Image: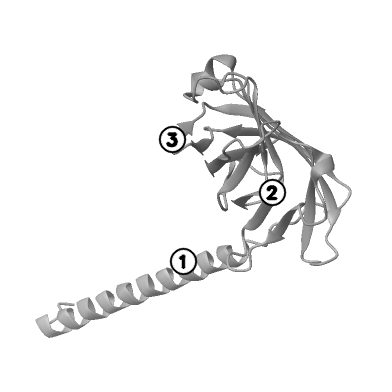
Amino acid sequence: MKLSKRKRARIVRRIAVGTVAAAAVGMAVAGVAVAARRTEQVEPKLPAPGATLVVDAASKGLELVCGGRRITTGPLEGRATFEIETNEYDPASVRTRIAEFSLTSPAKQGGVTIAVDPSDQNAGERSVLRRDRSRPARIEHTIDVPLTVTVRYPEILGLPAGTAEPLELASEAAAVLIGQLSGFPPKRARYKLGREAVLSPQGRSGAEPVTLVKFPLRLEGF
């Protein structure tokens, strides 16, 4: 049966409308699927108290200011160990007490060592791991580190001639490192210095303090 032009036009319009409607439904279903996937991004679990976690640590280098001069060290590598403890002040978080924290650079780059003495930590200087309420799929890790920085060969880094060898620096207050993680142990988690830290030369009365300006840190769990 031969259709008139008007009927054919009607059928074509109906097919077009149906196609558009089907596409709209498909897009809506896809949107619901994406939303479902987002809601499935459950908040990452915090490690259980009592656990001990060892991670690799690496830094592109420290940036220091000494006597008005900016000094950058070479890359450093090392390891950190965290002991997980309950946080009585915030049940939604855990403390990650530092049992070990040490990074070093080769002698040709000044022979820099960054270390934390666990015995120097007090209740207010323990790192804390908590869920980031603004980003449910992330965890915020704040590390308070009472740093000791030792430079075996200061002149290699451009420090003034006559600087004591080795040069030993200790933070007057704990340095603060902050990282946003997808879980813990971390996977290529990057941390940055929360604020500048003042490092005082040890065994040299009247010596000018050194300011730690940058300390980029990367932690990688096993």
Q: Give the SS element for disc 1.
A: helix
Q: Residues within 10 Å of mark 1 (few under 14, many from 20)?
A: few
Residue at image x 57%, y 53%? 194
Identify the residue under disc 2.
Answer: 174
Among the 4 quarters of the image, the one containing residue 42: bottom right
* Relative vertical location of residue 130 with respect to residue 54 in this rendering, above or below: below
Q: Quadrant of the C terminus?
A: top right
38 horizontally vs 8: left or right = right
The amino acid type, in three-letter code, at marker 3 is Arg
Q: Nearer the viewer, mark 2 or mark 1?
A: 2
184 horizontally vs 105: left or right = right
The amino acid type, in three-letter code, at marker 1 is Ala
The amino acid type, in three-letter code, at marker 2 is Ala
Q: Residues within 10 Å of mark 3 (few under 14, many from 20)?
A: few
Q: Position of residue 73 (x, y in %)?
A: 52, 28
Q: Is residue 215 visible?
A: no
Q: Earlier in the sequence, mark 3 or mark 2?
A: 3
| Residue furthest out toward the top | 108
Q: Is residue 165 visible?
A: yes
Residue at image x 51%, y 71%? 32
Q: Give the SS element for disc 2.
A: loop
Alpha carbon of mark 3 to alpha carbon of mark 2: how far? 23 Å
> Which of the pair 72/127 is nearer the observer?
72
Identify the residue under disc 1.
Answer: 30
Mark 3 and mark 2 residues within 8 Å of each other at the beta carbon: no
